[in-house]
Image: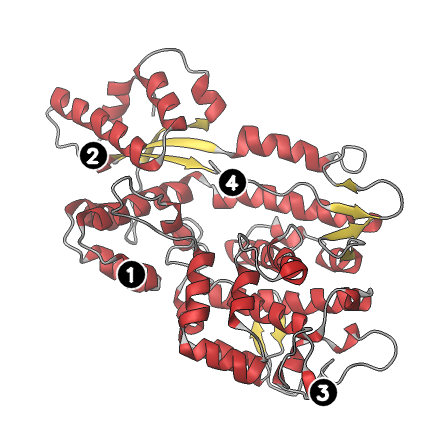
Amino acid sequence: MGAVGAGGRAADGAASGLDAAIPRAAAPPGPAPATWPGADDDAPIRIPVRGNVPAGPAVRALLDTGPMQRLRGVRQLGVAHLVYPGATHTRFEHSLGVFALGRLLVGRLMARGGRRFLGDGDAHHFLAACLLHDIGHYPFSHTLEELPPHPEGRVAVARHDERARALILGDAGIRAVLASHWGCDPERIADVIDEHATGGGAVGARLRHMLCGPLNPDRLDYLERDSQHVGVPYGRAIDVERLLAAVDFDPGGTTLGVTAKGVSAVETLIFASYLMYREIYWHHAVRCAQAMLKRAAAEALLGGQVDPRRLTAADDEQAVALLRGCGNGATAELMGLLSPGRSLYRRLFDGTARQAEALPPGEAGDLLRALAAAGFWEAGDVLAGVAASYARRSRADVRPHHLLVDVAGRDKELFFAVPVLGPGRRTTTADPDVSLLAPSLAHNFERHAKRLQLLAHPDHARGLAAHLGVRV
């Protein structure tokens, strides 16, 4: 590929293996630029759901870098395989799926006149970002990322997109491939992946919205892919073909929306997202396993038995080995219960925050209301006091880590408002006159999908339940 100039288009009309990433059918009427597209003459990579993903030299060179190869050992859904045996697919597979959908999205936008807003160089940066978007992910999916900074600074886990920026800018192999095979600027790609970034001007914001906004290839792929591997129909009901047929830039080129014919397809996406969070990602046993794993990691990090840089740079199996062998007793006990033949903690309470608020005054009600409002470290201190009180009364060997709380979706916001493009006033799917489904799901997501669980070690669950006056 020729060097990318300031305007974002490849110079000198040179072609490369990357050109195979842009679909031929997407070319607009009339003469096509030399870089749009090349021939898909390289052996594709076949993955579930998407089938054959074209992979020219530029794609394969990026896949062969160390940070990308690490994703072969990072499961997409963390410890969900303890509940759903098929959930062993990886972020490497998912990254290829996002790239495949990114090609389709760019092609459809270009065919609908998107060249007003996207040059070839912009498309190349976007497709590179599709492949690299998950390289900053830690082991165990989002579990470690849910650890907030410790008040004393002993634990601090950056967002995965911040870590992706550090890897893209700091890994010599990635920088070399982006320069020699893609003609792309690493800083610009990092800005596309980091949804909190502000660089790149209008084009940077546009590319970020394409990757991180409501109608992004990341979400479309993981919902369908996770459904396929878990064995549920929810994500497979998304009308991806109709959605891509209706997607377009708004008149200013700042966001993506759909024509009126695409509203029903957006509704399938919103409904799939709602169901996947409520029934799969926030399944009570999945969240229980994540709470145990999060506490195991927190104990080892606070105790200084695990180097945080080694843990966050590991893949899943390496991270499990680090935690099991770290020498921290609480961590070892929790990791033992998470071994095959699992014996997860038992639920003492499982309900919404509103249900916790409605409990009558008393130790259990007061505790659950306090936990619903507390942060991770504060909640740990509260529960340590409860465990100590029960240990004194029962003379049982109950430790602080034997009582845990999990709040699913405390700060999670799903999208429900997608612009609907057309003449007249600007509308979105959150408008009841446009969609009755989206506003209803938004209401249900806040009231019913977000849940609080109080969890206890299986050996002490009945005793702690009696101590707190709750049923198990």
In percent of the image, x 65 and y 66: which residue is there? 102
Residue 154, image x, y percentages = 24, 47
Q: Separation of disc 4 and disc 2 at Cα?
A: 27 Å
Q: Which residue is mark 2?
A: 400
Q: Which residue is mark 1?
A: 309
Question: Quick one: SS at disc 1?
Answer: helix
Judge from the rendering whether residue 431 lies leftward or rightward of residue 365; answer left or right.
Answer: right
Q: Considering depth in this image, is 29 or 154 the residue closer to the camera?
A: 154
Q: Residues within 10 Å of mark 4 (few under 14, many from 20)?
A: few
Residue for badge 4: 412
User: Relative to 171, is 255 on the left or the right?
Assistant: right
Q: Position of residue 383 (x, y in %)?
A: 26, 29
Q: Residue at x 36, y 34 (%)?
A: 375
Q: CA distance from mark 2 to mark 1?
A: 26 Å
How busy is the neighbourhood of tag 1: few (under 14 within 10 Å), some, or many (20 plus)? few
Could you tell me how far apart the alpha carbons at marks 4 and 1 are, in whole angstroms? 26 Å
Q: Is residue 87 visible?
A: no
Query: Nearer the viewer's eye, disc 2 or disc 1?
Result: 1
Could you tell me the amino acid type at mark 2? Pro
> Which of the two discs, 4 and 2, sits closer to the camera?
4
- The label shown at residue 91 is none
Looking at the rendered structure, the secondary structure element under dot 3 is helix
x and y, in percent, of residue 185 in the image? 55, 73
Q: Nearer the viewer, residue 153 or 236?
A: 153
Tally the marks. Answer: 4
Mark 3 or mark 4, which has the lower sequence index? 3
